[in-house]
Amino acid sequence: MEKTIKKSQLKSTDDIISLRDIIDIFLINWKWFILSVIICLGLGYLYLMTKPHIYKRSAVMLVKDDNGNMGSAARSKIGTDALMQLNGVIMGSSVKNEVYILQSHQIMMDVVRRLRLDVTYDCKYHLKNISLYDLRPFTAVFDTIETEHPYAFRVELHGNEAHIGDLQTEYGKVEFEKTVKLGQPVNTPFGKLTLLPAGADTLQFFDGRAITVTHLTVDQAANGFGSRLKAGEIDKESTLVGITYTDQNIQRADDILNAVLSSYQKGIIDDKNRIAQSTAEFIDQRISLISKELSEVEGELAEFKQRNKLVNLKEDATAFIQQSSQARQRSIQLESQVQAIQYLLENLKDKANGNDLIPSLSGVTDAGIQSQIMKYNELLLERNRLSENTGQSTPIIVQTNQRLEQMRNAIIASTEAFLSSMNVQLRRAKQEEQGLSGTLSTVPEKEKRALDIQRQQTIKETLYTYLLNKREETALQLAITEANIRVVETPFGSDIPISPRRKIIMLIALMLGVVIPFAFFHIRNLLNVNVRGRKDIETYTSIPVLGEIPHHKKNEDDSEILVGEQRTDPINEAFRMLRFSLNFVNKDARVIMFTSTTPGEGKTFVSRNFSVTLGMTGKKVILVDTDIRKRTQSKLAGITHREGLTSYLSGNTDNIEKLIVKDLSEHNVDMLPAGIIPPNPSELLMSNRLEQLIDELKKTYDYIVIDNVPAQVVADAGIVNRVADVTLYIIREGIIDRRYLPELQRLYEEKKFNNLCIIINDARREQKRYGYGYGYGYGYGYGYGYGGEKSKKSKK
């Protein structure tokens, strides 16, 4: 269970490529990596040679508000803003609006027309196409300013002559060839054309070169050049706007930026003037209308005053009020006097009051009546004084009474006459009061009407004055030709191109030169499903790996015995390591069986050389060929038809000695051949005589090496394994599928083979560097490493 868990853990982490694996790929395949890097760098350089240089130019402008302040940007709207202000509406814009306008299609179309960018000139220079702008040998002049269809043609210069040809339109090629002198008009399918020459030095430089002239529509040219123009806010807290343009030609980029700023300024000024002109016309119309309405209101007010006899409405109203108040006071006074006279008259006519004094009332204003009353009262007082000394019947008293009676009647008569006079005055006073009250009641209505007329007059006067002021402001605006922007930075930039980026492209080329071979070798290795070395075996199984036999050109020759006492090459050291490792697996093992998965994995080669390696220690070794079907070991020894193992197993002979071939090599190694091929190989191997044979051989030999059949071909390997102390399973690199390793693990866990161990054959050194083994650091003698000169000679 623990082994299974450990194996699962190994499999889960083994597929991750390590840094060591990456380094090993580089070290093993360094030649391919250098070649790939050289090729990729060359392709990168070639790419750079074919791409034109692109330069970046920039400009900065400051957007001011309509008052010239450096606040938030706003396009000038003087006329419309003034009218909107009358309705309480505030108009304005932001810096984002200006950014959009700067990049607008209309501005770029204006730039194209100004700079004649609808006609471009290109020339092949080395491997790249360069765009000619300020440095061109001629200027193409067409009879039409604009065209509805694009076309292109080629011009080859030869001295003062130009050959025109290769005419291309959007519908295809047009046959046209003609040679003309520079400056001479020529009729072409697209109209009359004149090539105006430039300076002599420029003509000499382009002599013999072909120049492609392309004539685009203004719309197409604006789209093409406009796509390289970028504008944006430099800072959210300011109104600075940055404008950038990328182009092959620095001078053209600067000219385009200047033209964009100029067109933008012109657009602002034109907008201001157009709006101001419209506003001025509107204001003049309104002034004329308001002037007429104001005259009508003033005439209506004059007529109203004249009709109502008013000079000043407020003063007239005050006079009416004072007169009414005075009339009322007079009416009250007269009423008081009338009441006083009536009271006096009643008192005079009352006979009971004949002996009383007549009261003197302030309401009686008639001086004659007052004088009569005064005399009457004096006479009455005199009579009363006389009557105290004389009787009532005395003549003087009687005479005085008669005089008093006469005077009283005279007072009554005067009072009645005065009362009549006062009643007349009272009626007149009331009539006057009522007349003034009626006149005064009509004053509010007149005042309301007069105020309404005056209000209209005031409104018309105010609006008239306002429009006059605005007309002056608009006239002043028409005289100003300054836009509400300021160019902070004129076009500037570095002379170093921003594209292509040489360092980045060469770095990418270098990286590709490294990545491509790395990916190739890594993917090739991932696609290889065969066993690639020790790492695969240890990943998929827990079977001990006894050792590795390195690759050698003679590995494929099973008859070759490569080991020897004086040899120190890697193969000899590998077999010595196998011999040494066997002691750790089972130091008492004497019967060693070799098998494999399929034929061709070097089982016979390893068993022969391993037998010799054991014999070099002075031990007696016998190599038994139990592959009685193919008899490979027997054939390699040159034994084809003689008796052998099958003769003993079948019972034809009991004499083992006569079956053994002595001294297969010079190192104490004998051989028991397979013998004649029997009809029943498996049955023979299952007989008890096999155990008897092994027991007999053990008496004579220290090691019995059994070369068996492949385990996955026939059942003989499992049958023979019952007599083996150790089973050495040969796996050749690159032969069997890794998917078989779990099956081999199952055989190991089920102990189908005794003390199963694996030997890796034909292990390749370069793969060991890529994580599939541990290399061969054996220390091959004194001063002889892997691949050393003396090692190579020993192999020979």
Image (tube, helix red, strand yellow):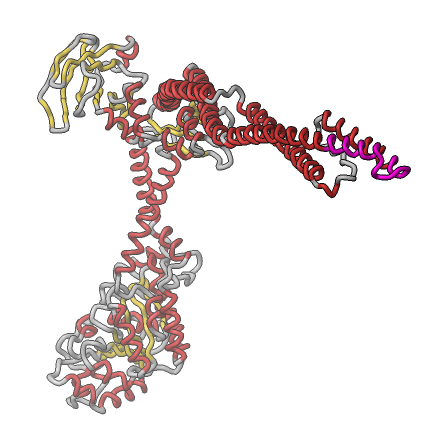
Number of numbered discs: 0
Q: In the visual, does 635 lie left or right of 3?
A: left
Name which residue lies at 33% across and 56% down.
Answer: 766
Nearer to the camera, 795 or 22: 22
Residue depicted at x 76% and y 32%: 402
Q: Residue at x 57, y 23 (%)?
A: 315
Q: Is residue 473 above or below residue 241?
A: above
Q: Is residue 20 magenta?
A: no
Tell me the quarter of the picture where residue 219 sits. top left
Q: Quadrant location of the N terminus?
A: bottom left
Instruction: Note whether 635 is above or below 477 in the view shown.
Output: below
Depth order, front residue of 779/562: 779
Q: Nearer the viewer, residue 411 or 169?
A: 411
Q: Position of residue 287 (x, y in %)?
A: 40, 19
The answer to whether residue 396 is magenta is yes
> Residue 739's x, y, as percent?
26, 70
> Residue 646's x, y, as percent?
17, 84
Name the foreground residue: 705 vs 18. 18
Range of magenta residues: 386-408
Q: In screen coordinates, is 201 left or right of 177? A: right
**Does residue 669 appear anywhere in the picture?**
no
